[in-house]
Image (cartoon, grey):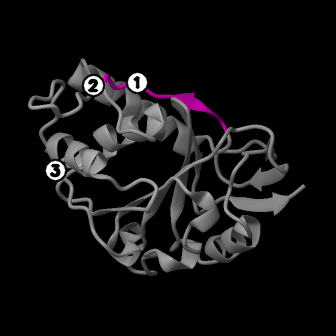
Amino acid sequence: MRPVFGRASGGLLPGFADPVGQTQQSFRAVMDAMARPGQVRELARPEGVPEGWPSALAALALTLLDQDTPVWLDRQGVSEQAAAYLRFHCGCPVVPECTEATFAVILDTAAAPPLHAFSIGDALYPEQSATLIMTVQSFEGGPTQRWTGPGIKKQALVSPKGLPPQFVPQWSDNHALYPSGIDIILVAGDAVMALPRSVSVEEG
């Protein structure tokens, strides 16, 4: 188990005020979001958040990352403050190549690597694939998408604003790899929406 600290010292940003309770609260919310794709779930709010990070991104880091989860940060997400936050609260290694990551943090979706650039696992070990934590401007206001698959009753019509270019065809290729393939957790403000690899996405 990784150590989780509520208070930082020496100028470091604090994490959760109630590390145990808020970590459990956020974990339950993330698992519920994964089980119900297309539905928005709020996470606990950390006391400190690296500059430029949404609150939910910091909450996900405090909840999911540890010494066994290499993380890759895109150019907008990486900073000495963010790296120090991850080292202190999570103990996770920050890796230079996205292919090495168990989790990847993407703040600049316009310049995001293609989905196939990340580890997709394989038929024997699909759990070794990467999970992308991707920030969007909002869960509304973007082009409408139709999500279907496990955890969705009939269909979910969602419209996240700020996804990468060519997201839908890239996701179609990723979905076709199931049970391999990446999963995505979309982040906006203090909330998340999950897109597991088992879910099909179509425009309109």
Between the residue at mark 3 and the residue at mark 1, the CA separation in whole angstroms equals 20 Å
- Marked residue nearer the N-terminal end (1 or 2): 2
Q: Position of residue 96 (x, y in %)?
A: 30, 72
What kind of element bears circle 1? loop
Tell me if mark 3 has few (under 14), some (14-19) or many (20+) residues whose alpha carbon lies within 10 angstroms of its own: many
Task: Specify the amino acid type for callout 2.
Answer: Phe
From the image, give the main secondary structure of the stretch colored magenta. loop
Q: Secondary structure at mark 2?
A: loop
Disc number placed over residue 91 in the picture, else none = 3
Give the mark nearest the N terminus, 3 or 1. Answer: 1
Residue at the right extreme, as displayed = 204
* Residue in front for this viewpoint, 163 or 197: 163
Q: Which residues are magenta?
A: 39-47
In the displayed structure, 152 sits above or below 112; it is above
Report helix, strand or loop for mark 3: loop
From the viewer's perspective, tell me whether residue 174 is left or right of residue 98. Answer: right
Label 1 belongs to which residue?
Answer: 44
